[in-house]
Image (cartoon, rainbow, N blue to C red):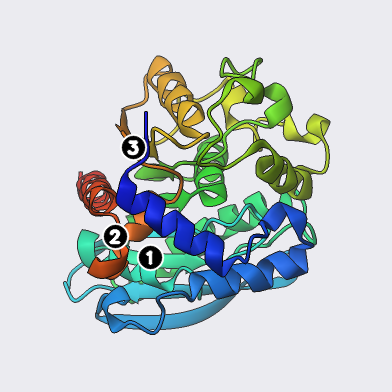
Amino acid sequence: MECDEELLAHLAQQAKIMEGRWFYEMTPEDARAAYAKLSSWHRGDPATKRPVGEIVDEVIHYGGEPMRVRVYKPAKTGRLPVVVYFHGGGWVFGNIDSYDEMARLICAECDVVVVNVDYLLAPEHRFPEPLLSCVESVAWTKQNIDAFGGDPDAVLVMGDSAGGNLSAATALECAHRNIELAGQVVLYGPLVHMDSASKAGVSEWSERDQRFGPTFDSTAWYWGHYVGDAERGADPRASVLLETDMASAPPALIAAGMLDTFCQECVAYGRALADNGVKVQVSEYPRLTHGYTSHGYMPPNNRSQLAYTASMETLANVRTLAYS
């Protein structure tokens, strides 16, 4: 399968901004600076920022560490469903500023309150600290979101890439703690440590099409900073495909581009949830790669129409899950 041509052009522009270097060749500090530059690519274009009703910044704490959360309220009034969003960035980089456009898009398209979370990052905070900080953000949301027009009984978790991993892991951890969630949305997440791929029933990395990424080298860098070693990576709270108790997990929406190296992990997670009796919807998008949902807010002259259409379909499914 070949990649969408407009998406290929977009990927080439990203490579140019990165000046031929990739995150796995950098220190975490340099990677954060590079990602900040990359994510600001279109920030000056007002078309990327969907208008919402109100935005409020708050600070919560986990283990004595402050974490920013940014709450987005849509123009729609009433007691609304809530999406707690965990950004991508390999557990190492990204924040609520680099994901402002995505949070606005979800808020406006889905008519939900969005809580955009600055969870703790690796390697300063290794597994399980980033995950547990996400769980804490859910607890805060359920306790406080009523003041923002959100319904504490209609809280979903959602994330992309590493945030997709955290969304799935948070949903499972909340289920084990009897913290009720209305749903989980997992977008192209890495769901099993590379050394546990065969144990999870997915292809080894040597057998995957890595042309469009994430590559083996990149993924090894991300997992290495997050868990440190393969033994810790085999913990089911990190490698959710190794979890054996999913029966109490919330309903799930799972989506990935078919050229994404994490796609089969997402499909396997959906299958495992379904086998445990959990309601699940899995969407695979031909000719699309990792990160396709960003085209939902990209300017029309700098996006893939195919990726944009898939992004809008994904968000329509998120809205359906939120209001079900």
- Disc 2 residue type (three-letter): Gly
The residue beneath circle 2 is 296
Q: Is residue 52 visible?
A: no
Figure check: 312 above or below 260: below
Distance from disc 2 to disc 1, alpha carbons, whole Å, reads 8 Å
User: Dot 3, crowdedness within 10 Å: few (<14), some or many (≥20)?
Assistant: some
Name which of mark 2 and mark 1 comes first in the sequence.
1
x and y, in percent, of residue 18 in the image: 60, 65
Local crowd size for mark 1, using a 10 Å CA cut-off: few (<14), some (14–19), many (≥20): many
**Mark-to-mark CA distance, 3 and 2:** 16 Å
Q: Secondary structure at mark 1?
A: helix
Label 3, label 1: how many angstroms apart (C-alpha)? 22 Å
Residue 26 lies in quadrant = bottom right
Q: Crowding near pointer 2: few (<14 within 10 Å), some, many (20+)?
A: many
For the residue pair 156 and 281, the one nearer the viewer reads as 281
Residue 288 can be seen in this image: yes
Q: Is residue 91 above or below residue 273?
A: below
**Quadrant housing the C terminus:** top left
Number of numbered discs present?
Answer: 3
Residue corresponding to mark 3: 287
Position of 157 compared to 36: left or right?
A: left
The reply to whether dot 2 and dot 1 touch (C-beta < 8 Å) is: yes
Residue 233's tag is none
**Where residue 56 sits in the image (x, y, percent)?**
41, 82
Identified by mark 1, the residue type is Met
The residue drawn where x is 52% and y is 34% is: 261
Secondary structure at numbered mark 3: loop
Q: Residue at x 61, y 62 (%)?
A: 119
Q: Is residue 26 left or right of residue 107?
A: right
Q: Amino acid at mark 3?
A: Arg
Residue annotated with mark 1: 102
